[in-house]
Image: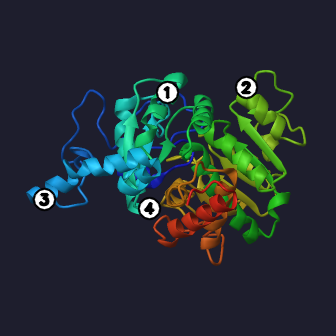
Amino acid sequence: MAPLADAAAAAVAGAAGAQGVADARPGSQQYPASGASASQHPDPADPVFAMHVGGKLEVVAKSPLRTRRDLSLAYTPGVAEVSRAIAADPTLLDVYTGRGNTVAVVSDGTAVLGLGDIGPGAAMPVMEGKAMLFKHFANIDAVPICLDTTDPDEIVETVARLAPTFGGINLEDISAPRCFEIERRLQERLDLPVFHDDQHGTAVVVLAALRNAALVVGKPLAGLRVVISGAGAAGVAIAAILARAGVRDVVVTDSRGVIGAHRTDLTPHKVQLAAQTNPRGVSGGIAEALAGADVYVGVSGGTVPEEAVAGMNTDSIVFALANPDPEVHPDVAVRYAAVVGTGRSDFPNQINNVLAFPGIFRGALDVRATRVSEGMKLAAAVAIADTVEVPSAGEVVPSVFDERVVDNVAAAVAEAARSEGIARR
């Protein structure tokens, strides 16, 4: 759950710490202060650990199994008739099994929350938390799958072979830049929705928040000067979706400064990013990037100097999403910005990807979409933004507990899939 702080997932996963950072650094593998150190046995009285005893998920049968007749219908001999029907007509798979409402939550444990590369076993509580969110918010059954490999070929092959069991694939907490390749290859290979939430869930909610924030400050979306700090999974996806939404001036920075054609130290995905952003040829560090900027989006961690924030344009917008420590603390940001958002639940405007992924998958599964398209992501962002009836500086996105969000997003995503001809019903 990289850069965007998925606070709800972190809560059910027992994390008091950060959502992962775009450029996850393996050295930052430190457990939250509320938990136990690696050398100590957890305190069973701690409510975090108490919630996790035995795990947070269970399998519950939908039909009763009380009599011989029940058994003969649910299993042999009755189930054989269903298997024969599916073998004759594979389209019946989603009708007579739970596959069409089941999502795999797949991770290799390399970019988990703010903990970095902690491995697949330690990632399991977080993936269970994600599965809880799928069920609670969208009534989707989700299965955590933590893979003991970081090799893209092995991950792709494993997920592809598991695909007949699932209606969709949610990739989670896989570090950049491998996550880009893994998602792309799975999308090309499978005819079902594959969605890396760390990238696209984050990007969808940022766009939704920015649409409404632009209305609040009275600036056209297309004319905004946007600075994104962080060139990992979320930063790349945010830059891409803003461009598709019509924002013409996006500058991205990493730990070494502004990304642009002047840099000779860029990795392949950053070379591509340089070609698609920084139209004014800005160079330097975060202070030079923010000079005169309308929007700051932080998905990198670290701290932005207050004097750099002070150099932004009037009526600026600051979305500092690192968790638990935003790149710009809200108390500092409000001195200069008209709209401030974070990934935290204890400040206004919680920009949280739980606003996006439940509804996106609900809509995609409902119409049996073959993929999650760019148009579906844009539709989701608009639906989230439009759920806020009267945007204000204190409310540019709805609450994650607003029951209208999933329905609105699902309907918009389903309609987009139908209009693009990728819905199968």
Mark in the foreground, 2 or 4: 4
Mark in the foreground, 4 or 1: 1
Residue count near mark 2 (Cα–Cα under 10 Å), binned few <14, some 14–19, many ≥20: few
- Separation of disc 4 and disc 3 at Cα? 33 Å
Task: Of the two numbered discs 2 and 3 on the same chain, state the one appearing first in sequence.
Answer: 3
Task: Of the two numbered discs 4 and 3 on the same chain, state the one appearing first in sequence.
Answer: 3
Q: How is the image coloured?
A: rainbow
Q: Residue at x 75, y 70 (%)?
A: 215
- Separation of disc 2 and disc 3 at Cα? 61 Å
Task: Of the two numbered discs 3 and 1 on the same chain, state the one appearing first in sequence.
Answer: 3
Q: Is residue 13 in sight in this rendering?
A: no
User: 149 or 393: which is nearer to us?
Assistant: 149
Q: Is residue 87 in sight in this rendering?
A: yes
- Separation of disc 3 and disc 1 at Cα? 40 Å
Task: Of the two numbered discs 1 and 2 on the same chain, state the one appearing first in sequence.
Answer: 1
**Residue 261 in the figure: left or right of residue 417:** right
Task: Of the two numbered discs 4 and 1 on the same chain, state the one appearing first in sequence.
Answer: 4
Residue count near mark 1 (Cα–Cα under 10 Å), binned few <14, some 14–19, many ≥20: some
Residue for badge 3: 69
Report the disc number at residue 268: 2
